[in-house]
Each structure stands twice: as C-alpha cells, then as structure tokens.
Image (tube, coloured by chain):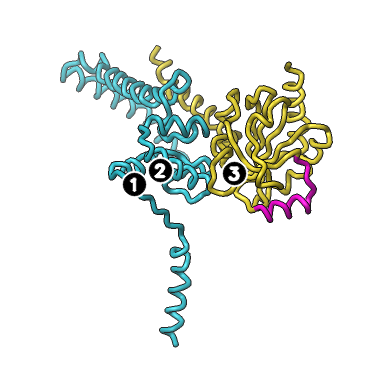
Chain colours: A yellow, B cyan
C-alpha cells in the first residue's frame, strides 16, 4: 500500500504528459463555429454588381450552397480561388460574401481571377450585417448552408484540394441527399 | 547638425504611436464606460489567441468593441452581452469559461490536485514521524544501538584498510 503511494507522482506526471503531448499536435486556431446546427442569420445586403438589388436570407434558400467570405485584401483568398472555381464547375452553388473590401477592388479581383460565384453579396466595411453575426473573424471563411438555411459545416482558413475532395464535396453531397 | 538629426530620429521613432487608432466612444452613462473596460477585458479576441478585444487592434476585435458599445448603450446586461458574443464566436471568446458538465474537469482538476498533493504530503510526513522503532527505545538502548552500528562499521572497514597497506 505504501509502495503504491510512492507511484502517485509518476502517475500524475504521465497523465499531464499525455495531455500536453496531445496539445502539441492540436491547432489552436481550428475550432468549431458556434453557428453549426443553427439557422443562418437574417440579413439584407446589396449585390456587388448592383447596389440597388438587395438580397435577403430567403432569396438564397431552397438548395444547398456554400457561402465563401473573401476580400481582395486577403492573400489566402487568392490561394483558394482555384478550388472555388473547381467546385463551381462541379455544380456547387457558391455565394460570395465580399468582406471589408471596396467595390472597385473587388471587381478587379473577379475580372482578374474569374468569377465562380453565383452571386456576390457586398458588405461595406463597418456594416456588421451578416459576417459578424456568422462569427466571421477573418477571411477566407466558408460555410455550408442546407436547404432549410441551417449552417452545417464551417471552415476558417484556406480551402485546399484535399479539403475539397475529402471533406467539402462529401459534405455538400450528404446534405443534398438529405431531403 | 547633430541636434537636427537627433530631432529627425526622435520624430521617426515616435511616428508610429501617432498613427495608432484612437477610438472615441460617447457613453450616455458613466457606468457604461467602466463596464466597457471590464467586459472588453474579459472577451478574448477571436483572431489573436492571447489578447482581449480591449488590447487587440485586429479588425475583428474592433468590430466586437463596436458591438459591445452598441449593446451597452441599448441597456443590455453583462450576461446578455457575453451570450451575444458566445452565440457568434463560441465559448472561445470567454476568458472565464462557463461552468458546465463538459468543463468541470477544467474547473475542478487543479484544486483537486492541490488537495491530493497536500494529503500526500501529510501522510508521508506522519508515517515518517511514526517510525515505531525509534519511538520505543530509551536513551540507553539507543546508545547501545549506536555503539553496535559503529563497531560493525569499524570491523567491516578493517580488512579493506589492511589490504590497502599490503599493496602499498
């Protein structure tokens, strides 16, 4: 019994070691969105190409789509653009949310790189109409919204080819099947 | 000349501070100002891992400060403000995590380990004090025991020392 007591520090050390070792391989910036399983917030934002046409939440619902938050100021958005084009070509509707940007710069971005978006919403800097309520804290960020307008998947960071093939496309297909 | 270049150097050195953004909030109530500082210090910036939204100059922290100001002016309570932020950014933004079933380990493990350590120390010290052989012996018995041990050591040391002298 006394012998056993002597092992307690060792046991505690091993437990703490396991926790810390696990922590080494964890990405502190990767965390689940608070919006998962919750409805996409209500909003009213103009289109990038037409400031007079206001789009609301109801206009987008009906089919599964991706909402991609981007800005011409965001270097990683250039990196993932190719993947967005690829998904759009595969038939996934992608809505763009232009975030903390300027109209002219956003236009230049799309004319230079091509426009894969079914529609781009323009949120003027300081408006906090949709991105803030979605918990967006940077760009790029991507949300998967189902037919009923529920947020089903979220990615904060760059879309890579592996993520498209292994995670995003399977998720899209899963929610498309779910009628 | 040297004076002039020193002036230029100083100007260049302090130029960055003058560019720092200055935010002005007009609080309608003085209590809002103290609560703004208090709540702003307890909300963690989602973009930067180790700064509160009051300390960070990232755009997302700025947005949160703006919303914090708006909510205070709307007369929301601190709890309502925390809930508003958690609904958007998750538990991550709280520097003080909530007390829930899945966070009890976080809250209770450190004090539990302290108590365990104290208990361990207490029992170890007590078991050492209560060494029965030392307690029961009288002074003369103890003297005898010491003498026995000393004799034993002298006896065991003798052969080795004699062997040493032989070799030398």
Direction from residue B136 to residue B77 in the image, left or right: right
Q: Quadrant of residue B17?
A: bottom left
Above/below status of B48 relative to B4: above
Picture coordinates of residue A28 (x, y %)? 56, 37
The residue wearing badge 3 is: A138
Residue B168 at least partly seen? no
Q: Which residue is mark 1?
A: B27
Q: Quadrant of the N terminus of chain B?
A: bottom left
**Could you tell me if the residues under marks 2 and 1 are in contact, i.e. CB atoms within 8 Å?**
yes
Q: Secondary structure at mark 1?
A: loop
**In front: label 3 or label 2:** 2
Q: Residue furthest front?
A: A52
Q: Earlier in the sequence, mark 2 or mark 1?
A: 1
Give the magenta range: A103-117
Residue with the most extreme bottom position: B1
Q: Mark 3: give few (<14), some (14-19) or many (20+) Cα within 10 Å.
A: many
Quickly name the residue at label 2.
B69
Horizontal and vertical percent position of residue B144: 21, 20
| Disc 2 chain ID | B
In the image, residue A109 lies at what x, y percent?
Answer: 73, 52
Chain bearing tag 1 is: B
Give me the chain letter of mark 3: A
Q: Name the residue: 42% across, 79% down.
A: B7
Residue positioned 71% across, 33% down in the render: A66
Locate residue B104, reporting x and y percent.
Answer: 43, 21
């Amino acid at each position: 019994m006394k012998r056993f007591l002597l092992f307690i520090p060792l046991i505690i050390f091993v437990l703490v070691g396991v926790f810390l070792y696990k922590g080494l391989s964890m990405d502190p910036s990767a965390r689940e969105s608070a919006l998962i399983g919750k409805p996409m917030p209500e909003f009213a934002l103009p289109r990038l190409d037409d400031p007079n046409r206001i789009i609301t939440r109801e206009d987008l619902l009906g089919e599964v789509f991706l909402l991609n938050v981007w800005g011409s100021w965001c270097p990683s958005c250039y990196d993932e653009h190719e993947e967005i084009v690829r998904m759009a070509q595969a038939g996934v509707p992608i809505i763009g949310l232009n975030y903390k940007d300027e109209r002219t710069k956003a236009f230049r971005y799309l004319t230079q790189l091509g426009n894969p978006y079914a529609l781009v919403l323009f949120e003027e800097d300081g408006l906090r109409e949709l991105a803030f309520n979605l918990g967006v804290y940077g760009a790029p960020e991507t949300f998967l919204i189902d037919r009923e307008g529920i947020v089903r998947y979220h990615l904060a960071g760059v879309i890579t080819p592996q993520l498209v093939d292994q995670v995003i496309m399977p998720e899209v297909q899963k929610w498309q099947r779910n009628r | 000349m040297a004076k002039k270049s020193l002036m230029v150097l100083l100007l260049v050195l302090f130029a960055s501070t003058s560019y720092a953004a200055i935010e002005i909030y007009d609080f309608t109530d003085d209590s809002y100002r103290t609560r703004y500082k208090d709540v702003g210090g307890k909300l963690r910036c989602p973009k930067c891992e180790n700064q509160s939204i009051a300390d960070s100059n990232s755009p997302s922290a700025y947005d949160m400060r703006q919303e914090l100001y708006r909510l205070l002016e709307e007369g929301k309570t601190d709890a309502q403000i925390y809930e508003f932020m958690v609904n958007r950014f998750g538990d991550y933004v709280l520097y003080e995590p909530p007390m829930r079933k899945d966070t009890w380990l976080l809250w209770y493990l450190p004090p539990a380990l302290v108590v365990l350590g104290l208990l361990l120390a207490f029992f170890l010290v007590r078991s050492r004090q209560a060494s029965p052989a030392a307690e029961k012996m009288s002074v003369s018995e103890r003297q005898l025991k010491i003498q026995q041990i000393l004799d034993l050591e002298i006896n065991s040391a003798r052969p080795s020392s004699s062997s040493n002298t032989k070799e030398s």
